[in-house]
Image (cartoon, rainbow, N blue to C red):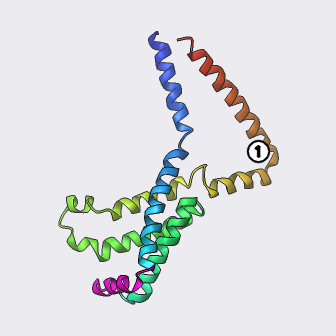
Amino acid sequence: MNQKKLVMFAAEIFDRLSGAGWIPALLMRLFVGYFFMETGWGKIHNLNAFTTRFAQWGIPHPAFNAALSAHTEFLGGALTIFGLGMRFVSIPMIINMIVAILTVKLKNVSGLDDFAELDEPLYALSFVWLFFSGAGWLSVDGLFKRALNFWIRPERSQATVGALSTRCAEARDDANGLRDF
């Protein structure tokens, strides 16, 4: 196999990986969404203990804020799993993590190493990434986007379908050509 073909093959694989950008969004949504839905559910069903912890931490209006936080986690997690309103859902989830960091976690942080070991900044950054990247192709948001594009510009949607068919045919031909290596 000559080097030029090998380099072209590698470049083609990396180009195709760019088209699979929806996979990391899906995996992130499923993992982080499940985590928050589960923890939110647990807090909702043990709201008295969660309210007590809020009072111990000195959070004002502990009953209201504990309920708000628990329901935000549960509902935000469920919507994240489905990829419904991902950019809107990300905002309260980021705020929830920032509040947790500032009111509870930061008290035990004495340096960058301690901060980097906290889970909450990572969860907040996950939602920052989802805010900017969106829910991805395999989501309710993605379905709405495709339906809206079809409804607003049916001629463009048909052109997109034609272009996808052409790309699939080209990919099949390329794959057949790669077998000749």
Relative to the observer, which residue lies in front, 51 or 141? 51
Q: Main secondary structure of the magenta part?
A: helix
Q: Is residue 51 a member of the stretch shown in magenta?
A: yes
Foreground residue among 78 and 58: 78
Relative to 53, is 148 on the left or the right?
right
Query: What residue appears at the point 20 percent right and 58 percent down from the top-left corner?
Result: 113
The residues colored magenta run 45-59
Residue 81's place in the image compared with 173, above or below, is: below
Q: How many marks?
A: 1
Look at mark 1 in the image and give the residue it sits on.
157
**What's the residue at 43%, 57% (across, down)?**
126
Locate residue 38, reporting x and y percent.
44, 68
Furthest toward the right, the residue is 155
**Residue 39 in the image: x percent, y percent?**
41, 70
Q: In the rendered view, tell whether residue 72 sits above or below residue 66.
A: above
Locate residue 60 relative to residue 15 in the image: left or right: left
Amino acid identity at mark 1: Ser
Q: Secondary structure at mark 1?
A: helix
Give the vertical position of 11 relative to 38 (above or below). above
Residue 27 is situated, as x and y percent measured from the top left of the image, at: 48, 50
- Circle 1 crowding by C-alpha within 10 Å: few under 14, some 14–19, many from 20: some
